[in-house]
Protein backbone atom coordinates (compact mmCIF):
# COMPACT_ATOMS: atom_id res chain seq x y z
CA UNK A 1 0.00 0.00 0.00
CA UNK A 2 1.49 3.37 -0.99
CA UNK A 3 2.17 5.72 1.89
CA UNK A 4 -0.36 8.31 0.83
CA UNK A 5 -3.17 5.82 0.74
CA UNK A 6 -2.13 4.49 4.09
CA UNK A 7 -2.22 8.06 5.46
CA UNK A 8 -5.66 8.56 4.02
CA UNK A 9 -6.76 5.30 5.54
CA UNK A 10 -5.47 6.42 8.94
CA UNK A 11 -7.07 9.84 8.59
CA UNK A 12 -10.37 8.34 7.66
CA UNK A 13 -10.15 5.98 10.59
CA UNK A 14 -9.22 8.83 12.92
CA UNK A 15 -12.00 10.98 11.55
CA UNK A 16 -14.61 8.29 12.00
CA UNK A 17 -13.26 7.46 15.45
CA UNK A 18 -13.39 11.08 16.55
CA UNK A 19 -16.84 11.50 15.17
CA UNK A 20 -18.04 8.42 16.99
CA UNK A 21 -16.49 9.67 20.22
CA UNK A 22 -18.19 13.04 19.88
CA UNK A 23 -21.51 11.47 18.97
CA UNK A 24 -21.35 9.16 21.98
CA UNK A 25 -20.45 12.00 24.31
CA UNK A 26 -23.24 14.18 23.03
CA UNK A 27 -25.62 11.23 23.17
CA UNK A 28 -24.78 10.77 26.84
CA UNK A 29 -25.42 14.45 27.45
CA UNK A 30 -28.77 13.94 25.75
CA UNK A 31 -29.67 11.04 28.01
CA UNK A 32 -28.72 13.10 31.04
CA UNK A 33 -30.77 16.04 29.81
CA UNK A 34 -33.78 13.83 29.13
CA UNK A 35 -33.62 12.36 32.61
CA UNK A 36 -33.06 15.77 34.17
CA UNK A 37 -36.02 17.23 32.29
CA UNK A 38 -38.33 14.68 33.90
CA UNK A 39 -37.16 15.76 37.34
CA UNK A 40 -37.07 19.42 36.53
CA UNK A 41 -40.63 19.52 35.29
CA UNK A 42 -42.19 18.76 38.65
CA UNK A 43 -43.61 21.69 40.50
CA UNK A 44 -44.66 22.28 44.13
CA UNK A 45 -48.43 22.26 44.62
CA UNK A 46 -48.52 25.89 45.73
CA UNK A 47 -46.83 27.19 42.56
CA UNK A 48 -49.58 28.34 40.22
CA UNK A 49 -49.11 29.13 36.52
CA UNK A 50 -50.43 32.44 35.14
CA UNK A 51 -53.91 32.59 33.57
CA UNK A 52 -54.34 30.79 30.27
CA UNK A 53 -51.31 28.55 30.80
CA UNK A 54 -51.48 25.43 28.66
CA UNK A 55 -51.53 22.03 30.37
CA UNK A 56 -48.15 21.67 32.11
CA UNK A 57 -46.44 19.44 29.56
CA UNK A 58 -47.47 21.61 26.63
CA UNK A 59 -46.64 24.71 28.62
CA UNK A 60 -43.06 23.57 29.18
CA UNK A 61 -42.66 23.09 25.44
CA UNK A 62 -44.23 26.40 24.54
CA UNK A 63 -42.81 28.79 27.15
CA UNK A 64 -39.57 30.36 25.95
CA UNK A 65 -38.79 31.79 29.39
CA UNK A 66 -38.71 35.39 28.22
CA UNK A 67 -40.41 36.88 31.26
CA UNK A 68 -42.62 39.26 29.29
CA UNK A 69 -45.64 38.08 31.30
CA UNK A 70 -43.75 38.89 34.49
CA UNK A 71 -43.01 42.38 33.22
CA UNK A 72 -46.55 43.11 32.11
CA UNK A 73 -48.23 41.94 35.31
CA UNK A 74 -49.39 45.21 36.92
CA UNK A 75 -49.41 43.64 40.38
CA UNK A 76 -45.93 42.11 40.11
CA UNK A 77 -47.10 38.74 41.36
CA UNK A 78 -45.33 36.63 38.74
CA UNK A 79 -41.84 35.23 39.14
CA UNK A 80 -39.54 33.29 36.86
CA UNK A 81 -38.21 30.07 38.31
CA UNK A 82 -34.56 30.48 39.21
CA UNK A 83 -31.97 27.76 39.08
CA UNK A 84 -32.40 25.77 42.26
CA UNK A 85 -36.12 26.54 42.54
CA UNK A 86 -38.39 23.56 42.36
CA UNK A 87 -39.88 24.72 39.08
CA UNK A 88 -38.62 24.46 35.50
CA UNK A 89 -35.94 27.15 35.19
CA UNK A 90 -37.18 30.42 33.78
CA UNK A 91 -40.87 29.56 33.73
CA UNK A 92 -43.42 31.90 35.34
CA UNK A 93 -45.47 31.14 38.44
CA UNK A 94 -47.16 32.84 41.35
CA UNK A 95 -47.81 31.86 44.94
CA UNK A 96 -51.38 32.55 45.97
CA UNK A 97 -50.76 32.99 49.68
CA UNK A 98 -48.31 35.85 49.16
CA UNK A 99 -49.37 37.23 45.80
CA UNK A 100 -52.55 35.98 44.18
CA UNK A 101 -53.75 36.81 40.66
CA UNK A 102 -55.87 39.96 40.75
CA UNK A 103 -57.74 38.86 37.63
CA UNK A 104 -57.20 41.93 35.40
CA UNK A 105 -59.91 42.26 32.79
CA UNK A 106 -57.33 42.88 30.03
CA UNK A 107 -55.23 39.87 31.05
CA UNK A 108 -51.95 41.67 30.16
CA UNK A 109 -49.78 38.66 30.96
CA UNK A 110 -51.54 36.61 28.28
CA UNK A 111 -51.35 39.46 25.78
CA UNK A 112 -47.60 39.75 26.39
CA UNK A 113 -46.86 36.07 25.76
CA UNK A 114 -45.13 35.69 22.37
CA UNK A 115 -45.68 31.97 22.01
CA UNK A 116 -49.20 31.11 23.15
CA UNK A 117 -47.81 29.28 26.17
CA UNK A 118 -50.42 31.51 27.79
CA UNK A 119 -53.32 30.81 25.48
CA UNK A 120 -54.37 33.91 23.56
CA UNK A 121 -57.83 32.41 23.08
CA UNK A 122 -58.49 33.31 26.69
CA UNK A 123 -60.40 36.59 26.43
CA UNK A 124 -62.49 36.46 29.60
CA UNK A 125 -60.47 36.14 32.80
CA UNK A 126 -63.43 34.42 34.46
CA UNK A 127 -62.93 31.56 32.01
CA UNK A 128 -59.36 30.97 33.18
CA UNK A 129 -58.56 27.94 35.30
CA UNK A 130 -55.25 28.57 36.99
CA UNK A 131 -56.12 26.04 39.65
CA UNK A 132 -58.95 25.35 42.02
CA UNK A 133 -59.51 26.62 45.55
CA UNK A 134 -60.02 23.80 48.00
CA UNK A 135 -61.17 24.21 51.59
CA UNK A 136 -58.57 21.73 52.59
CA UNK A 137 -58.76 21.90 56.37
CA UNK A 138 -62.18 21.73 57.97
CA UNK A 139 -60.62 21.23 61.38
CA UNK A 140 -59.11 24.71 61.51
CA UNK A 141 -61.48 26.71 59.30
CA UNK A 142 -63.35 28.71 61.92
CA UNK A 143 -66.62 28.53 59.98
CA UNK A 144 -66.77 24.89 61.00
CA UNK A 145 -66.56 25.96 64.63
CA UNK A 146 -69.66 28.04 64.16
CA UNK A 147 -67.75 31.34 64.07
CA UNK A 148 -68.69 33.99 61.55
CA UNK A 149 -65.78 34.59 59.15
CA UNK A 150 -66.78 34.32 55.49
CA UNK A 151 -63.68 36.29 54.45
CA UNK A 152 -62.96 33.93 51.55
CA UNK A 153 -66.55 34.24 50.42
CA UNK A 154 -66.37 38.03 50.54
CA UNK A 155 -63.03 38.53 48.75
CA UNK A 156 -63.89 36.12 45.95
CA UNK A 157 -64.07 38.11 42.70
CA UNK A 158 -66.74 35.73 41.44
CA UNK A 159 -68.78 36.22 44.56
CA UNK A 160 -71.38 33.65 45.47
CA UNK A 161 -70.67 31.61 42.35
CA UNK A 162 -67.12 30.37 42.93
CA UNK A 163 -67.59 30.26 46.71
CA UNK A 164 -71.05 30.06 48.21
CA UNK A 165 -72.07 29.74 51.85
CA UNK A 166 -73.92 26.64 52.87
CA UNK A 167 -76.02 27.21 55.95
CA UNK A 168 -76.02 24.20 58.24
CA UNK A 169 -77.33 23.41 61.71
CA UNK A 170 -74.82 23.95 64.50
CA UNK A 171 -75.10 20.80 66.57
CA UNK A 172 -72.84 22.15 69.32
CA UNK A 173 -75.05 25.03 70.38
CA UNK A 174 -78.19 23.42 69.06
CA UNK A 175 -79.70 26.75 68.01
CA UNK A 176 -77.11 28.51 65.77
CA UNK A 177 -76.03 28.07 62.18
CA UNK A 178 -72.73 27.18 60.53
CA UNK A 179 -71.92 29.18 57.38
CA UNK A 180 -69.77 26.75 55.49
CA UNK A 181 -67.85 28.07 52.44
CA UNK A 182 -68.27 25.75 49.45
CA UNK A 183 -66.12 26.10 46.31
CA UNK A 184 -67.68 25.44 42.93
CA UNK A 185 -65.28 24.33 40.23
CA UNK A 186 -67.53 25.55 37.43
CA UNK A 187 -66.85 29.13 38.47
CA UNK A 188 -63.58 29.17 40.47
CA UNK A 189 -60.60 30.47 38.42
CA UNK A 190 -57.98 29.54 40.98
CA UNK A 191 -56.87 33.16 41.38
CA UNK A 192 -55.99 32.55 45.01
CA UNK A 193 -57.46 35.73 46.49
CA UNK A 194 -59.29 33.55 49.02
CA UNK A 195 -56.09 31.81 50.02
CA UNK A 196 -54.32 35.09 50.66
CA UNK A 197 -57.31 36.44 52.59
CA UNK A 198 -57.77 33.40 54.83
CA UNK A 199 -57.37 34.70 58.37
CA UNK A 200 -55.63 31.62 59.74
CA UNK A 201 -51.90 31.42 60.36
CA UNK A 202 -51.82 28.78 57.66
CA UNK A 203 -54.64 29.09 55.16
CA UNK A 204 -57.44 26.54 55.45
CA UNK A 205 -58.50 27.28 51.88
CA UNK A 206 -55.77 26.79 49.28
CA UNK A 207 -55.45 26.85 45.54
CA UNK A 208 -54.10 23.69 43.97
CA UNK A 209 -53.36 22.78 40.38
CA UNK A 210 -56.47 21.29 38.78
CA UNK A 211 -55.07 17.78 38.63
CA UNK A 212 -54.46 17.77 42.39
CA UNK A 213 -57.69 19.48 43.33
CA UNK A 214 -60.23 17.57 41.28
CA UNK A 215 -61.47 14.03 41.51
CA UNK A 216 -62.86 12.34 38.46
CA UNK A 217 -65.87 10.09 38.29
CA UNK A 218 -65.38 6.84 36.36
CA UNK A 219 -66.44 7.48 32.79
CA UNK A 220 -68.96 4.62 32.91
CA UNK A 221 -70.91 6.19 35.75
CA UNK A 222 -74.43 7.42 34.96
CA UNK A 223 -76.38 9.17 37.67
CA UNK A 224 -79.94 7.89 37.17
CA UNK A 225 -81.74 11.02 38.24
CA UNK A 226 -79.62 13.22 35.99
CA UNK A 227 -80.11 10.97 33.00
CA UNK A 228 -83.84 10.95 33.71
CA UNK A 229 -83.83 14.76 33.81
CA UNK A 230 -81.95 14.96 30.52
CA UNK A 231 -84.17 12.45 28.72
CA UNK A 232 -87.41 13.69 30.27
CA UNK A 233 -88.26 10.14 31.38
CA UNK A 234 -86.69 7.16 32.99
CA UNK A 235 -84.28 5.33 30.70
CA UNK A 236 -85.09 1.91 32.17
CA UNK A 237 -88.51 0.20 31.91
CA UNK A 238 -90.48 1.25 34.99
CA UNK A 239 -91.35 -1.53 37.43
CA UNK A 240 -94.81 -3.00 36.83
CA UNK A 241 -97.11 -2.30 39.67
CA UNK A 242 -97.17 -5.22 42.02
CA UNK A 243 -100.48 -6.91 42.38
CA UNK A 244 -101.32 -8.70 45.56
CA UNK A 245 -103.53 -11.68 45.25
CA UNK A 246 -105.96 -10.65 47.93
CA UNK A 247 -109.64 -11.33 48.47
CA UNK A 248 -112.17 -8.74 47.29
CA UNK A 249 -112.41 -5.66 49.39
CA UNK A 250 -109.01 -6.09 50.96
CA UNK A 251 -105.87 -3.99 50.29
CA UNK A 252 -102.37 -4.24 51.54
CA UNK A 253 -100.58 -1.07 52.61
CA UNK A 254 -97.51 -1.17 54.80
CA UNK A 255 -97.82 2.40 56.05
CA UNK A 256 -101.42 1.73 56.86
CA UNK A 257 -100.01 -1.15 58.85
CA UNK A 258 -100.91 -4.14 56.81
CA UNK A 259 -104.18 -5.52 55.59
CA UNK A 260 -106.92 -2.96 55.15
CA UNK A 261 -110.47 -3.94 54.61
CA UNK A 262 -112.33 -1.49 52.39
CA UNK A 263 -116.02 -0.82 52.28
CA UNK A 264 -118.57 -1.84 54.82
CA UNK A 265 -116.91 -3.40 57.69
CA UNK A 266 -118.11 -6.90 57.53
CA UNK A 267 -117.45 -9.21 60.30
CA UNK A 268 -115.13 -11.08 58.06
CA UNK A 269 -114.05 -10.61 54.46
CA UNK A 270 -114.74 -14.22 53.80
CA UNK A 271 -118.12 -15.66 52.93
CA UNK A 272 -119.38 -18.27 55.13
CA UNK A 273 -119.52 -20.44 52.06
CA UNK A 274 -115.92 -21.53 51.28
CA UNK A 275 -116.88 -22.11 47.63
CA UNK A 276 -117.48 -18.37 47.19
CA UNK A 277 -113.91 -17.63 48.06
CA UNK A 278 -112.59 -20.35 45.82
CA UNK A 279 -114.73 -19.23 42.89
CA UNK A 280 -114.22 -15.50 43.31
CA UNK A 281 -111.24 -15.32 40.92
CA UNK A 282 -113.22 -17.02 38.16
CA UNK A 283 -116.24 -14.85 38.68
CA UNK A 284 -114.12 -11.64 38.03
CA UNK A 285 -112.87 -12.92 34.73
CA UNK B 1 6.16 30.80 20.56
CA UNK B 2 4.46 34.03 21.58
CA UNK B 3 5.72 35.55 24.80
CA UNK B 4 2.61 35.98 26.93
CA UNK B 5 4.23 38.65 29.10
CA UNK B 6 4.67 40.98 26.15
CA UNK B 7 1.44 40.07 24.35
CA UNK B 8 -0.05 43.19 22.81
CA UNK B 9 2.93 45.43 23.65
CA UNK B 10 3.81 45.94 19.99
CA UNK B 11 0.31 47.04 19.16
CA UNK B 12 0.24 49.45 22.11
CA UNK B 13 3.58 50.86 21.06
CA UNK B 14 2.44 51.27 17.46
CA UNK B 15 -1.13 52.47 17.99
CA UNK B 16 -1.51 53.47 21.63
CA UNK B 17 -3.47 51.63 24.32
CA UNK B 18 -6.88 52.92 23.35
CA UNK B 19 -6.63 52.06 19.68
CA UNK B 20 -5.20 48.64 20.41
CA UNK B 21 -8.19 47.89 22.65
CA UNK B 22 -10.77 49.65 20.54
CA UNK B 23 -13.02 46.74 19.62
CA UNK B 24 -12.56 45.05 22.97
CA UNK B 25 -13.87 48.18 24.69
CA UNK B 26 -16.68 48.60 22.15
CA UNK B 27 -17.72 44.98 22.66
CA UNK B 28 -17.82 45.38 26.42
CA UNK B 29 -19.87 48.55 25.99
CA UNK B 30 -22.20 46.62 23.69
CA UNK B 31 -22.55 43.63 26.02
CA UNK B 32 -23.03 45.71 29.17
CA UNK B 33 -25.15 48.27 27.34
CA UNK B 34 -27.59 45.62 26.20
CA UNK B 35 -27.83 44.35 29.76
CA UNK B 36 -28.33 47.92 30.96
CA UNK B 37 -31.21 48.45 28.53
CA UNK B 38 -32.96 45.47 30.11
CA UNK B 39 -32.11 46.57 33.66
CA UNK B 40 -33.22 50.22 33.69
CA UNK B 41 -36.80 48.96 34.01
CA UNK B 42 -36.50 46.69 37.02
CA UNK B 43 -33.88 48.88 38.71
CA UNK B 44 -35.10 52.42 38.05
CA UNK B 45 -38.61 51.95 36.66
CA UNK B 46 -37.48 53.30 33.32
CA UNK B 47 -38.75 50.73 30.83
CA UNK B 48 -36.74 50.62 27.63
CA UNK B 49 -36.61 46.90 26.92
CA UNK B 50 -38.81 44.30 28.58
CA UNK B 51 -38.20 40.56 28.67
CA UNK B 52 -34.84 38.98 27.99
CA UNK B 53 -32.80 37.72 25.05
CA UNK B 54 -35.30 34.89 24.42
CA UNK B 55 -37.95 37.43 23.56
CA UNK B 56 -38.18 41.12 24.25
CA UNK B 57 -40.21 44.19 23.54
CA UNK B 58 -38.37 47.48 23.07
CA UNK B 59 -40.20 50.71 23.88
CA UNK B 60 -43.45 48.75 23.59
CA UNK B 61 -43.14 48.56 19.79
CA UNK B 62 -40.14 46.54 18.63
CA UNK B 63 -40.41 42.81 19.23
CA UNK B 64 -37.22 40.75 19.09
CA UNK B 65 -37.20 37.00 19.49
CA UNK B 66 -34.33 34.55 19.62
CA UNK B 67 -34.77 32.29 16.57
CA UNK B 68 -32.95 29.42 18.25
CA UNK B 69 -35.21 29.36 21.30
CA UNK B 70 -38.33 29.79 19.18
CA UNK B 71 -37.18 26.98 16.90
CA UNK B 72 -36.94 24.69 19.91
CA UNK B 73 -40.42 25.73 21.02
CA UNK B 74 -41.79 25.20 17.51
CA UNK B 75 -40.28 21.73 17.41
CA UNK B 76 -42.09 20.91 20.61
CA UNK B 77 -45.29 21.87 18.84
CA UNK B 78 -46.07 25.48 19.63
CA UNK B 79 -47.52 27.97 17.14
CA UNK B 80 -45.97 31.36 17.93
CA UNK B 81 -47.77 34.68 17.90
CA UNK B 82 -47.24 37.11 15.02
CA UNK B 83 -45.09 39.40 17.17
CA UNK B 84 -42.70 36.54 17.86
CA UNK B 85 -42.42 35.72 14.16
CA UNK B 86 -41.74 39.37 13.30
CA UNK B 87 -39.16 39.40 16.10
CA UNK B 88 -37.43 36.35 14.69
CA UNK B 89 -37.34 37.77 11.16
CA UNK B 90 -35.73 40.99 12.39
CA UNK B 91 -33.12 39.13 14.43
CA UNK B 92 -32.33 36.70 11.62
CA UNK B 93 -32.00 39.52 9.10
CA UNK B 94 -29.66 41.43 11.41
CA UNK B 95 -27.33 38.51 12.04
CA UNK B 96 -27.50 37.41 8.44
CA UNK B 97 -26.02 40.79 7.53
CA UNK B 98 -23.48 41.40 10.29
CA UNK B 99 -22.45 37.80 10.99
CA UNK B 100 -24.23 35.31 13.19
CA UNK B 101 -21.53 35.03 15.76
CA UNK B 102 -21.67 38.75 16.39
CA UNK B 103 -24.25 37.47 18.86
CA UNK B 104 -21.47 35.57 20.63
CA UNK B 105 -18.91 38.34 20.78
CA UNK B 106 -21.03 41.49 21.03
CA UNK B 107 -24.20 40.39 22.83
CA UNK B 108 -23.84 37.16 24.80
CA UNK B 109 -22.98 37.78 28.47
CA UNK B 110 -21.15 34.44 28.74
CA UNK B 111 -18.54 35.89 26.40
CA UNK B 112 -17.29 38.13 29.20
CA UNK B 113 -16.82 35.07 31.39
CA UNK B 114 -15.02 32.99 28.79
CA UNK B 115 -12.91 35.96 27.69
CA UNK B 116 -11.86 36.39 31.30
CA UNK B 117 -11.00 32.70 31.50
CA UNK B 118 -8.97 32.91 28.27
CA UNK B 119 -7.17 36.01 29.54
CA UNK B 120 -6.34 34.30 32.84
CA UNK B 121 -5.13 31.22 30.97
CA UNK B 122 -2.65 33.38 29.12
CA UNK B 123 -1.60 35.27 32.26
CA UNK B 124 -1.18 32.12 34.34
CA UNK B 125 0.30 30.15 31.50
CA UNK B 126 -2.20 27.34 31.76
CA UNK B 127 -1.59 25.13 28.76
CA UNK B 128 -3.81 22.16 29.56
CA UNK B 129 -6.05 21.41 26.66
CA UNK B 130 -8.55 18.64 26.47
CA UNK B 131 -8.75 17.54 22.87
CA UNK B 132 -12.22 17.47 21.58
CA UNK B 133 -13.57 18.57 18.29
CA UNK B 134 -14.89 22.01 17.49
CA UNK B 135 -17.68 20.25 15.65
CA UNK B 136 -19.04 19.01 18.98
CA UNK B 137 -21.19 22.13 19.04
CA UNK B 138 -23.06 21.02 15.92
CA UNK B 139 -23.79 17.69 17.54
CA UNK B 140 -25.03 19.60 20.56
CA UNK B 141 -27.15 21.77 18.29
CA UNK B 142 -28.66 18.70 16.67
CA UNK B 143 -29.28 17.19 20.08
CA UNK B 144 -31.05 20.27 21.39
CA UNK B 145 -33.29 20.30 18.34
CA UNK B 146 -34.05 16.58 18.46
CA UNK B 147 -34.83 16.44 22.19
CA UNK B 148 -38.05 18.48 21.96
CA UNK B 149 -39.27 15.96 19.38
CA UNK B 150 -38.42 12.93 21.50
CA UNK B 151 -39.17 13.99 25.04
CA UNK B 152 -42.57 15.30 26.01
CA UNK B 153 -42.45 18.40 28.11
CA UNK B 154 -40.61 20.63 25.89
CA UNK B 155 -37.64 22.80 25.41
CA UNK B 156 -35.16 20.63 27.25
CA UNK B 157 -32.07 22.68 26.44
CA UNK B 158 -33.57 25.79 27.96
CA UNK B 159 -33.64 24.00 31.32
CA UNK B 160 -29.86 24.15 31.40
CA UNK B 161 -28.78 26.60 28.69
CA UNK B 162 -26.14 28.71 30.46
CA UNK B 163 -26.42 31.48 27.89
CA UNK B 164 -30.09 32.25 28.49
CA UNK B 165 -29.66 31.34 32.14
CA UNK B 166 -26.99 33.93 32.75
CA UNK B 167 -28.76 36.75 30.94
CA UNK B 168 -32.10 35.91 32.54
CA UNK B 169 -30.35 35.54 35.86
CA UNK B 170 -28.94 39.06 35.71
CA UNK B 171 -32.25 40.58 34.60
CA UNK B 172 -34.73 38.50 36.62
CA UNK B 173 -32.81 36.86 39.45
CA UNK B 174 -29.85 34.57 39.41
CA UNK B 175 -30.73 31.78 41.84
CA UNK B 176 -28.05 29.13 41.59
CA UNK B 177 -27.30 29.98 37.93
CA UNK B 178 -23.95 31.39 39.01
CA UNK B 179 -22.85 27.80 39.57
CA UNK B 180 -23.30 27.19 35.84
CA UNK B 181 -21.39 30.37 35.04
CA UNK B 182 -18.61 29.40 37.41
CA UNK B 183 -18.59 25.94 35.85
CA UNK B 184 -18.07 27.39 32.38
CA UNK B 185 -15.38 29.70 33.69
CA UNK B 186 -13.45 26.84 35.29
CA UNK B 187 -13.99 24.61 32.27
CA UNK B 188 -12.52 27.26 29.99
CA UNK B 189 -9.77 28.08 32.43
CA UNK B 190 -8.59 24.61 33.33
CA UNK B 191 -10.02 21.97 31.01
CA UNK B 192 -10.00 23.40 27.51
CA UNK B 193 -9.03 26.61 25.78
CA UNK B 194 -12.17 28.28 24.41
CA UNK B 195 -13.92 25.12 25.58
CA UNK B 196 -17.45 26.39 25.92
CA UNK B 197 -17.86 29.01 23.18
CA UNK B 198 -15.57 27.38 20.68
CA UNK B 199 -16.47 23.74 21.10
CA UNK B 200 -19.73 23.04 22.88
CA UNK B 201 -22.21 25.89 22.90
CA UNK B 202 -25.10 25.06 20.53
CA UNK B 203 -26.32 28.65 20.63
CA UNK B 204 -23.07 29.72 18.98
CA UNK B 205 -23.37 26.86 16.52
CA UNK B 206 -26.85 28.03 15.58
CA UNK B 207 -25.78 31.62 15.01
CA UNK B 208 -22.75 30.31 13.19
CA UNK B 209 -25.11 28.75 10.63
CA UNK B 210 -27.32 31.86 10.52
CA UNK B 211 -24.34 34.04 9.60
CA UNK B 212 -22.55 31.63 7.30
CA UNK B 213 -23.11 33.95 4.31
CA UNK B 214 -23.00 37.22 6.21
CA UNK B 215 -21.89 40.43 4.55
CA UNK B 216 -19.78 41.92 7.34
CA UNK B 217 -16.48 40.05 7.72
CA UNK B 218 -13.04 40.61 9.09
CA UNK B 219 -10.37 40.61 6.39
CA UNK B 220 -6.60 40.58 6.19
CA UNK B 221 -6.32 42.94 3.24
CA UNK B 222 -2.90 44.13 4.40
CA UNK B 223 -1.57 40.62 4.76
CA UNK B 224 1.76 41.49 3.11
CA UNK B 225 2.52 43.60 6.18
CA UNK B 226 2.21 40.57 8.48
CA UNK B 227 5.41 40.10 10.49
CA UNK B 228 4.45 36.65 11.79
CA UNK B 229 4.26 37.74 15.41
CA UNK B 230 1.45 35.18 15.85
CA UNK B 231 -0.34 37.31 18.43
CA UNK B 232 -3.62 37.27 16.50
CA UNK B 233 -3.66 33.48 16.75
CA UNK B 234 -3.21 33.72 20.49
CA UNK B 235 -6.05 36.14 21.19
CA UNK B 236 -8.45 34.72 18.61
CA UNK B 237 -11.16 32.48 20.12
CA UNK B 238 -11.38 30.59 16.81
CA UNK B 239 -7.75 30.74 15.58
CA UNK B 240 -8.34 28.21 12.80
CA UNK B 241 -10.21 30.87 10.81
CA UNK B 242 -7.23 33.20 10.43
CA UNK B 243 -4.74 31.13 8.50
CA UNK B 244 -6.59 30.68 5.19
CA UNK B 245 -7.04 34.43 4.85
CA UNK B 246 -3.75 35.61 6.34
CA UNK B 247 -1.47 33.05 4.73
CA UNK B 248 -3.46 32.17 1.62
CA UNK B 249 -1.89 34.66 -0.72
CA UNK B 250 0.25 32.08 -2.50
CA UNK B 251 -2.74 29.81 -3.06
CA UNK B 252 -4.66 32.82 -4.34
CA UNK B 253 -7.11 32.61 -1.44
CA UNK B 254 -9.23 35.60 -0.57
CA UNK B 255 -7.93 37.79 2.28
CA UNK B 256 -11.45 37.85 3.74
CA UNK B 257 -12.02 35.56 6.69
CA UNK B 258 -14.93 33.59 5.31
CA UNK B 259 -15.27 30.93 7.98
CA UNK B 260 -18.50 31.47 9.86
CA UNK B 261 -16.71 30.31 13.01
CA UNK B 262 -15.24 33.81 13.13
CA UNK B 263 -17.13 35.80 15.76
CA UNK B 264 -16.31 39.21 14.25
CA UNK B 265 -14.98 40.21 17.64
CA UNK B 266 -12.16 42.30 16.18
CA UNK B 267 -9.51 41.23 18.67
CA UNK B 268 -7.15 40.45 15.77
CA UNK B 269 -7.66 43.98 14.47
CA UNK B 270 -6.80 45.39 17.91
CA UNK B 271 -3.77 43.21 18.60
CA UNK B 272 -2.08 43.62 15.22
CA UNK B 273 0.68 46.22 15.30
CA UNK B 274 0.81 46.23 11.51
CA UNK B 275 -2.91 46.90 10.94
CA UNK B 276 -3.26 43.82 8.77
CA UNK B 277 -6.88 43.22 9.70
CA UNK B 278 -9.96 45.33 9.27
CA UNK B 279 -13.73 44.98 9.03
CA UNK B 280 -15.11 44.94 5.52
CA UNK B 281 -17.57 43.43 3.14
CA UNK B 282 -17.71 39.79 2.16
CA UNK B 283 -16.14 40.58 -1.21
CA UNK B 284 -13.67 43.20 0.01
CA UNK B 285 -10.58 43.59 -2.14
CA UNK B 286 -7.52 45.68 -1.62
CA UNK B 287 -8.12 49.36 -2.39
CA UNK B 288 -11.77 48.54 -2.79
CA UNK B 289 -12.47 50.59 0.29
CA UNK B 290 -10.68 53.62 -1.10
CA UNK B 291 -12.50 53.39 -4.38
CA UNK B 292 -15.81 53.18 -2.67
CA UNK B 293 -15.06 56.15 -0.49
CA UNK B 294 -14.30 58.06 -3.67
CA UNK B 295 -17.59 57.03 -5.21
CA UNK B 296 -19.50 58.06 -2.13
CA UNK B 297 -17.91 61.50 -1.98
CA UNK B 298 -18.56 61.96 -5.70
CA UNK B 299 -22.15 60.95 -5.13
CA UNK B 300 -22.42 63.44 -2.30
CA UNK B 301 -21.05 66.23 -4.52
CA UNK B 302 -23.50 65.39 -7.29
Image: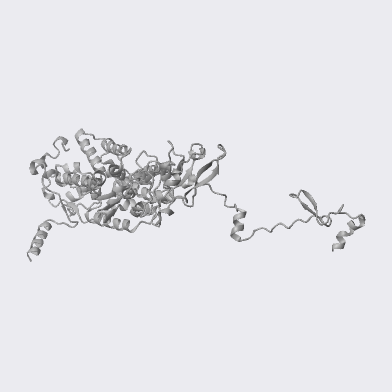
Q: Nearer the viewer, residue B17 or B229?
A: B17
Residue at left 56%, top 49%?
Answer: A217
Q: Position of residue A57 (x, y in %)?
A: 43, 49
On the image, which quarter does residue B193 sit in? top left
Q: Residue furthest bottom?
A: B302
Q: Nearer the viewer, residue B275 or B73?
A: B73
Q: Position of residue A86 (x, y in %)?
A: 39, 40
Q: Residue furthest top?
A: B124
On the image, which quarter does residue A85 sit in? top left
Relative to B291, say whether A21 is above or below: above
Number of marks present in the image shown: 0
> In the displayed structure, does residue A128 sit left or right of residue B224?
right
Relative to B133, say whether A119 is above or below: below
Q: Nearer the viewer, residue A232 or A284?
A: A284
- State which quarter of the image contains the C terminus of chain B: bottom left
> In the displayed structure, does residue A232 sit left or right of residue A103?
right
Q: Residue furthest left?
A: B301
Q: Position of residue B160 (x, y in %)?
A: 35, 43
> In the displayed structure, does residue A143 sit left or right of residue A125?
right
Amino acid sequence: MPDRERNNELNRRQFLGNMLKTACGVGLVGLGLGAYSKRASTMPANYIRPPGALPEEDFLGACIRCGLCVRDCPYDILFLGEVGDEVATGTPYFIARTGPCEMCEEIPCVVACPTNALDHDLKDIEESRMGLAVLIDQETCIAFHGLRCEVCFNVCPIRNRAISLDMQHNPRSGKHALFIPVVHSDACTGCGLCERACILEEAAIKVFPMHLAKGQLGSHYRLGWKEKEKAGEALVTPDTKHRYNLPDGVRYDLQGEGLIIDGEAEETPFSSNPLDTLNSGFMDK
Amino acid sequence: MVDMTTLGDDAIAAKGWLKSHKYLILRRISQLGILALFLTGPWFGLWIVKGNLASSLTLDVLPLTDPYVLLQASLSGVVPETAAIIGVVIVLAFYFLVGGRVYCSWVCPVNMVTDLAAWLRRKLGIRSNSQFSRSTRYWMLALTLILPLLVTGGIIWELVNPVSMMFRGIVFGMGAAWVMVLGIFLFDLIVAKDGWCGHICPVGAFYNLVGSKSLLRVNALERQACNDCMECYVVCPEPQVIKPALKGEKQGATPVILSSDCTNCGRCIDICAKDVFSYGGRHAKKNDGLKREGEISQGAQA
